[in-house]
Image: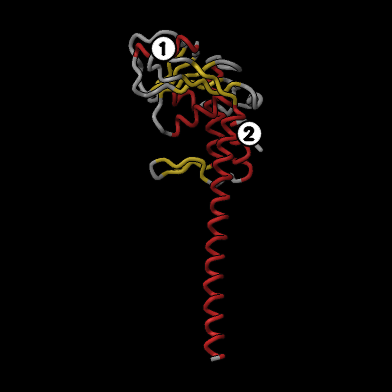
Amino acid sequence: MTHTLWGLVEGRARDAPHAPAVFFEKQAISNREFRQRVLSLARGLASLGVGRGDVVAAQLPNIPEYLLTYAAVCALGATLQPVHMPYRRAELNHLLGHSGAKVFVCVSRVEGLEGPEHVIQLASEFAALAAAAPLDRVREGSPEDRFLLLYTSGTTDNPKGVPHAQRGFLANAMGLQLGEIFQGWFLGNLIVSVIGAVILIIIVKLVRNRSA
């Protein structure tokens, strides 16, 4: 079983290189292409000094660039901090200051933002980072390493950071996948059993009618 996100990316690129890794707006990115794009972005982030244990915050919608950032951060042994899209300067300054994020990837620049050494805008700097030569040495870390930093909603107080290791999240993902496989197997066998029972009943009735 794969216990790191990069291991999952590598495995899919090796075992099913032409199968789609991502569907977005009627276009597909194959597993092989996804791996290459992740390695290029990882090289770009590494050029900014991102390495093992560093935090990269990302405030992006559900687009391929978000998934690429997620995987690239993990390939460097760093930690991804997802940021809720509606958050603005006050919330961002608290969250990014608390996490010590070195890089902030966002759709557009936020005036008055404090903390991160580098702010990467999707429409400009991101494309340049993603065009770097592929990273030649992945530093994915171990299944027990922190790879995700989530924050509570902060309903009654300031949001609190909750770190997560790779093992738990990927185990959940693999469990869902196995659950879908088992569900499909169970339903398939159930359908076959019901059809078999119906055919058996029909055969018995035909035999009885002939005997009569």
Name the quarter where the N terminus is drawn: top right
- The image shows residue 32 at horizontal and vertical percentages of 57, 40
Marks 1 and 2: in contact by CB < 8 Å?
no
- The image shows residue 79 at horizontal and vertical percentages of 55, 20
Q: Nearer the viewer, residue 126 or 128?
A: 126
The residue positioned 45% from the left and 42% from the top of the image is: 23
Task: Indicate the secondary structure of the residue bearing disc 2.
Answer: helix
Q: 58 above or below 10?
A: above
Q: 184 above or below 164?
A: below
Q: Residues within 10 Å of mark 2 (few under 14, many from 20)?
A: some
Task: Indicate the secondary structure of the residue bearing disc 1.
Answer: loop
Q: Residues within 10 Å of mark 1 (few under 14, many from 20)?
A: few
Q: Which residue lies under the disc numbered 1?
A: 158
Q: Which residue lies under the disc numbered 2?
A: 7
Left or right: residue 24 compared with residue 78: left
Q: Quadrant of residue 64?
A: top left
The residue positioned 56% from the left and 15% from the top of the image is: 54
- The image shows residue 169 at horizontal and vertical percentages of 56, 31
Q: Quadrant of residue 109?
A: top left
Q: Nearer the viewer, residue 41 or 98?
A: 98
Question: Which numbered disc, 2 or 1, marks the residue closer to the eye?
Answer: 1
- Label 1 sits on what residue type? Asn
The mark that comes first in sequence, 2 or 1, is: 2
Q: Nearer the viewer, residue 82 or 60?
A: 82
Q: 24 above or below 152?
A: below
- The image shows residue 210 at horizontal and vertical percentages of 54, 90
Q: Quadrant of residue 196?
A: bottom right
The residue positioned 63% from the left and 45% from the top of the image is: 15
The residue positioned 54% from the left and 29% from the top of the image is: 71
Q: CA distance from mark 2 to mark 1?
A: 35 Å
Labels in figure, total: 2
- Label 2 sits on what residue type? Gly
